[in-house]
Image: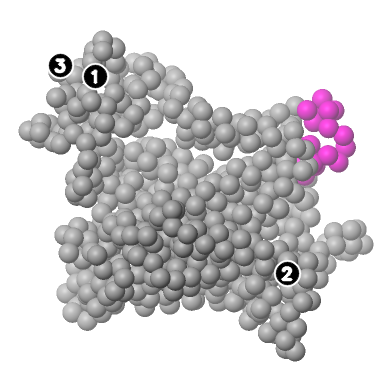
Amino acid sequence: MIPLGPYGFPEPPWGNQGAPYFAPGGREVLLYETMTSLHTTYPCGLSSGPLGSPWALGPDTSGGRGPEVTPNGTLQEMTDSKKTQDVAKNDLMYTVDDVPPWYTSVLLGIQHFLTMVGGTISIPYILTPLLCIDDSDPARGKLVCTILFVSGMVTFLQTTVANHPGRYVCLPRAHHAILTTSFEPCNFALHKNMTASEIEEEWQVRMREIQGAIAVASIVQVVIGFTGLMGLLLTWITPLTIVPTVTLVGLSLFQTAADKASGHWGISFLTIALLVLFSQYLKEVPVPIPGYKKGQGCAVSWVYIFKLFPVLLAIILSWGLCGILTAAGTFPAGNRARTDLNLNIINKSPWFRFPYPGQWGLPTASLAGVLGMVAGVVASMIESVGDYYACARIAGAPPPPVHAINRGIGIEGIGCILAGLWGSGNGTTSYSENIGAIGVTKVGSRRVVQVASIIMMVFGVVGKFGAAMVTIPEPVVGGMFIVMFSMITAVGLSTLQFVNLSSSRNLFVIGFSIFFGLALPKWLETHSDSIQTGNVTLDQILSVLLQTSMLIGGILGFVLDNTIPGTPEERGLLEWNAHKNLSSDNPESNPECYDLPFVTETVKRMTWTKYLPFCPNFAGCSVWCRRKPKDIEA
């Protein structure tokens, strides 16, 4: 048996990290710690986790020295969730409550910021055509800055109060349905005969409608979270409800991705190829980074750059090539792959601009718009619950108790209200990419994400930065869209791992929910006058709701899976409930890392707070969440 060191690697018997160590088979392994990549690496190509090494994790029999490995190449089964959690903690450089040095926190915070930038810059490219904002309008840069600022603000709120990650997500199908039913289609040709103030009012009136819809619809999310309804609904939100809801978020965006990529398919294919190359083929290839360590002199750190920043690298390289081809005159004037089409945005944008509530005017709201946005809010809540559990597993924390989920959903709703008031054009939810970054960097510290949120707010007030982000050529963005939206689709489909795909019942629920969720909204786009109830307001409400793919698919999946007879094993409920691990009998179901900051002890001394679903001492779960339908009981 070979003992592992504190980071999950074979421990050299002499304790010298810089000395060679000969592993089984005679291969020379050099062990050292790199502060640049913040994890121990093998220069000879071995991966940094026990699953990727020639040995596998075994039970801890090292007398306190750490877990041990066996040279049999297979992972020994660990059925105890507590052991799995301890292994995850041992593999982390910093756990949830650890506070890294300030300089380390800043570096890791910048990394989290760069991880979310790739998804953030896509939002203006989706929203601005719907809002009637010209490609050369500096308002696009202002929109990026607003998104970054509010995203940082909400992320800090989530990680401090709700103890969950935060980010931005776009709900473009709801936006499309609201704007197309409430306003005339955008005619950019008319802008030539309009004054600057008229053009500004044209898009701002649309933005105010979206703002109001987001803010009012988010009240529903606040109520669901803080009243404990989310914890109660967890029993009926099954894998076959989540699959069509999240999958249709990605599938419904294929037209947007194709439109952007069609500007120059060659550049789009290049962007796609680079993304696939970096994220799939080169993700385990370390890159040497020279540096200096105090007391050790010059040193080389091996960093998995391609795994950390595949989107950023692909955008930079494709953008750079477009710049070279533009300078060489390869692209004709007006080609959407040129990099000089929107340079005036940077010149017109101020260096510093502080986003503020009501910057586009007083938000307005309509009943149809609010109900349409509620569909997006419901979809984001379902996605967030899954992300909460994923983040806890990766960060080595216990599964979130019900009070933490309730509080997280409620705070997320408050974040959406703030987004509506500030005018970002979209709401907030958890971000899967940043959760994945925790697993890559082996840093689960809450403080790092809080630092990242401050960095977001700082860049949110730098107007030139936001303007630069919207000058990326459309074909580059289109290639990025195709890969990112396909990943959203895949994330939705990945939940099928819990269900029995040999069951004709399950295949019907999945297929019908997804297909009808695409077919009906697509038909209504070209037959907008087909809904005529005699009441204009009701027509508008039905049109918005029925054009929202994720709502149609999610409702169908929810109703069909909970009404069509099926065994718990067939529906995937046994594995799903084990995955969630919400049993209050688990001693780790109410861990301190999910407590409220500063006031937890005071709250627990107040006996009446046990009836509040968002408090750490919430006792209502024993009445609500443990009541399961008869077909779920095992």
Q: Is residue 65 visible?
A: yes
Badge 3 element: loop
400 or 300, nearer to the observer: 400
Seen in the picture, residue 529 relative to 463 is either above or below; the reply is below
- Disc 1 from disc 3: Cα separation: 9 Å
Q: Is residue 463 visible?
A: no
- Disc 2 from disc 1: Cα separation: 65 Å
Q: Which mark is residue 17?
A: 1
Q: Which mark is residue 524?
A: 2
Seen in the picture, residue 216 relative to 40 is either above or below; the reply is below
Seen in the picture, residue 413 relative to 94 is either above or below; the reply is below
Asked if marks 1 and 3 touch (Cβ < 8 Å), the reply is no
Q: In the rendered picture of this protein, how many numbered marks are placed on residues?
A: 3
- At x 46%, y 44%, the residue is 112
Question: In the displayed structure, does residue 551 sit left or right of residue 398?
Answer: right
- At x 75%, y 37%, the residue is 265
Badge 2 element: helix
Q: Position of residue 209 (x, y in %)?
A: 67, 73
Q: Position of residue 629 (x, y in %)?
A: 31, 74
626 or 590, nearer to the observer: 626
- Disc 2 from disc 3: Cα separation: 71 Å
Residue 337 within the magenta-colored segment of the rendering: yes
